[in-house]
Image (spheres, grey):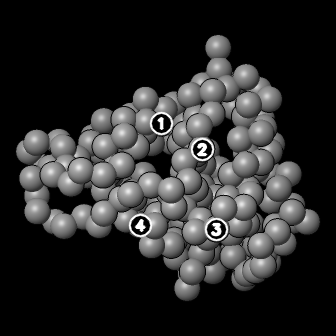
């Protein structure tokens, strides 16, 4: 019996470099018999957190957008992949907004395996650590039982499609394939 895998792609470009790595991860995971769903955040309506605090007690956001559906998917998933292009050495705005909006049900997103995918024109893993720290701040510091499985760095990819010639493609496929 395969695992339920949710991939969250925050690339603003369908087929962009981080989105392409998501597809490769998905391909590997499906080959191993897992159920995989990829969500392209650009296709979703997700408003910014307004900081009203209602969700702290109600465990439901007052905004009526696509986030409630995504939270259901996160709670149901066994494995969650968070993927973002790196802009100015951190995750993009779409991913940050998504993470901020997890507040209503973050206590239910427990005991999950996490994979992080980041892509950048830069070639230094060390300079990507601020982006990874954003993911870890969410998973390690806020979610009970979060287990970071792997970080996939898609470096040296500026233009759409440049990732296809990088080692990260193989790493993404292998990471997905290894999930059983």
Residues at marks 2 and 4, CA–CA distance in whole angstroms: 18 Å
Q: Circles 2 and 4: CB distance less than 8 Å?
A: no
Question: Is 56 above or below relative to 130?
Answer: above
Circle 4 crowding by C-alpha within 10 Å: few under 14, some 14–19, many from 20: some
Q: Which residue is drawn at 76% across and 80% down?
A: 158
Circle nearer the N terminus (4, 1):
4
Give above or below for 85 relative to 159: above
Q: Name the residue under label 4.
A: 96
Instruction: Tell me the element at label 1.
Output: loop
Residue 101, above or below 91? above
Mark 2 highlights which residue?
38
Asked whether, in this view, residue 180 is left or right of residue 7, the answer is right
Q: Is residue 167 above or below residue 32?
A: below
At label 1, counting other C-alpha atoms closer than 10 Å, the crowd grade (few under 14, some 14-19, many 20 or more) is many
| SS for dot 3 | loop
How packed mark 2 is, by other alpha carbons closer than 10 Å (few <14, some 14-19, many 20 or more), is some
Closer to the camera: disc 3 or disc 1?
3
Disc nearer the start of the sequence (2/4): 2
Q: Quarter holding the N terminus? A: top right
Which mark is on residue 53?
A: none
Between marks 3 and 2, how big is the CA–CA gap? 14 Å
What residue lies at 66% left-to-right and 62% top-to-bottom? 14
According to the picture, the residue beneath numbered tag 1 turns out to be: 112
Q: Do the residues labelled 2 and 1 touch (CB within 8 Å)?
A: no
Q: Where is residue 46 in the image (x, y as percent from the top left)?
A: 36, 59
Q: Does the image show residue 130?
A: no
Instruction: Identify the residue at horizontal 64%, vertical 68% (top origin).
Output: 13
Which residue position holds label 3? 13
Identify the mark nearer the N-term, 3 or 1: 3
Evaluate whether residue 63 shows in this view.
Answer: yes
């Amino acid at each position: 019996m395969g695992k339920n895998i949710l991939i969250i792609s925050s690339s603003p470009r369908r087929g962009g470099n981080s989105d392409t790595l998501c597809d490769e991860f998905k391909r590997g995971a499906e080959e191993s018999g897992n159920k995989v769903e990829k969500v392209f955040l650009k296709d979703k309506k997700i408003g910014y957190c307004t900081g009203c605090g209602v969700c702290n007690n109600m465990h439901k956001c007052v905004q009526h957008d696509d986030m409630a559906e995504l939270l259901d998917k996160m709670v149901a998933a066994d494995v969650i992949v968070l993927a973002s292009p790196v802009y100015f050495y951190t995750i993009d705005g779409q991913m940050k907004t998504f993470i901020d909006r997890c507040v209503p049900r973050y206590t239910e997103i427990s005991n999950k395996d996490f994979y992080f995918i980041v892509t950048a024109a830069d070639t230094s893993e060390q300079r990507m650590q601020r982006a990874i720290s954003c993911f870890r701040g969410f998973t390690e510091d806020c979610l009970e039982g979060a287990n970071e499985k792997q970080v996939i760095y898609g470096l040296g990819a500026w233009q759409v499609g440049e990732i296809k010639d990088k080692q990260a493609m193989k790493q993404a496929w292998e990471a997905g394939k290894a999930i059983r």
